[in-house]
Image: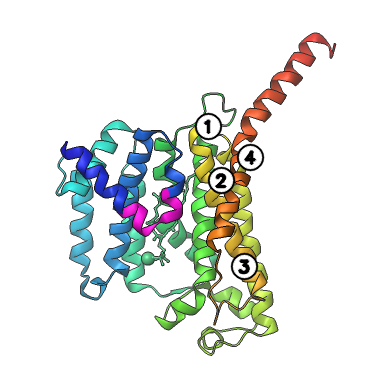
Amino acid sequence: MFLEEAYERCKKICAEYAKTFYLGTRLMTEERQKAIWAIYVWCRRTDDLVDGPNAVYLSSEALDRWEERTEDIFNGRPYDMLDAALTDTVYKFPLDIKPLKDMIEGMRLDTWKSRYANFEELYQYCYCVAGTVGLMSVPVMGIAPESHLSSQSIYDAALSLGIGNQLTNILRDVGEDAQRGRVYLPQDELAQFGLCDDDIFSRKVTDGWREFMKKQIRRARFYFNQAEEGASQLDKASRWPVWSCLIIYRKILDAIEENAYDNLTKRAYVGKAKKLLTLPQAYTRALSMSNLAFQSNLSCEKHITGGQ
Ligand SMILES: CC(C)=CCC/C(C)=C/CC/C(C)=C/CC/C(C)=C/[C@@H]1[C@@H](COP(=O)(O)OP(=O)(O)O)[C@]1(C)CC/C=C(\C)CC/C=C(\C)CCC=C(C)C
Ligand SMILES: [Mn+2]
């Protein structure tokens, strides 16, 4: 009863704060969706420590305490009801604590770092706050028994989806982040296009900015492409939400292009109708591995029978 109530609360939080993710989880088995809600809630609370309404009071001790609490969750000693849901999830699924600790490290980074010298530094940040979400999700979502890829390459694909998502968030939010004095863009690449922080603060969309943005969008798309094959190797029931997530995030990049690369004064937006339209598209993609497996069985049979 207690656990049911705990998961119910996680469900409500996920449904309220992340409608698209929530919708996606509804397609999974009951055990899996509960686990993803518990992970979502832990991620949301971690991010809220540095981004939420009380973030101004955040001390480094508070993050240390959160890390200890996370260790306690993994040691079967939850602190509150929401933690208890994650303790149960950790008991049921082979979740590793490393990505959770790395996410906390990313939040620590965010408390003092507001500039990124190059893409290597930015990648590290994206890994911590978003790549880790991919790594946490795979043990719950499961790998299809008929998958022909190594589990390493599926984890790599999950990591890529997280990186692509975060790069996209960053490109969508450049204007908002600048208002908070933050520039999550590689400084060396800005300079290559003759740009600097002041060009962002002055919010002028110049040809240089547009060219710079084309490069950044190309890179985010590269990570989405990397994620594709792995997404189709997940357990059948988990593929649909992952494909929806991939397609919707890609559409945010399309929306930035449609805004003529003005992400300084406009927020790229994917409307409800467009999001709903992705569902059948994602469903078709989610079926694709079965087709591939079917095709490879056919070609295998052809080989055996000499194509007769
Ligand atoms: C093989 C393969 C492709 C597997 C799929 C693996 C998978 C499910 C990957 C999903 C990756 C994903 C959803 C990443 C989320 C990235 C994200 C939104 C990170 C946000 C970080 C901080 O950014 P910022 O502060 O700039 O953003 P806000 O303005 O505050 O929004 C985060 C906020 C970190 C915290 C992350 C979350 C709260 C989201 C966690 C989501 C899940 C656990 C659900 C994943 C499930 C589905 C169905 C995709
Ligand atoms: Mn945040």
Spatial distance from mark 2 to mark 3, Cα to Cα? 18 Å
* Residue placed most toward the observer, 143 or 246: 246
Q: Are marks 2 and 3 in contact (CB under 8 Å)?
A: no
- The residue mark sitting in front, 2 or 4, is 4
- Residue 255's label in the rendered image is 3
In this view, the residue in front, 177 or 61, is: 177
Name the spot of residue 113 as percent of width and height, x first. 38, 73
Screen quadrant of the C terminus = top right
- In the figure, is residue 20 to the left or right of 168? left
Q: Quadrant of the N terminus?
A: top left
Q: Amino acid at mark 4?
A: Thr
Where residue 223 appears, x then y in whole percent?
59, 53
| Magenta run includes residue 142 | no
Which numbered disc, 1 or 2, marks the residue that appears first in the sequence?
Answer: 1
Mark 4 element type = helix
Q: Which of marks 3 and 2 precedes in the sequence?
A: 2
Q: Amino acid at mark 2?
A: Trp
Residue assigned mark 1: 236
Q: Residue at x 60, y 60 (%)?
A: 251
Q: Which residues are magenta?
A: 13-22
- Which amino acid lies under the numbered mark 3 shown in the image of this protein? Ala
Per the image, the residue denoted by label 4 is 284
Is there a contact, CB below 8 Å, between mark 3 and mark 1?
no
Looking at the rendered structure, the number of numbered marks drawn on it comes to: 4
Disc on the earlier residue, 4 or 1:
1
- Residue 62, compared with residue 67, is above or below; it is below
Residue sitting at 16 percent across and 44 percent down?
78
For residue 99, side relative to residue 70 (left or right): right
Camera-nearest residue between 153 and 279: 279
Which residue position holds label 2? 243
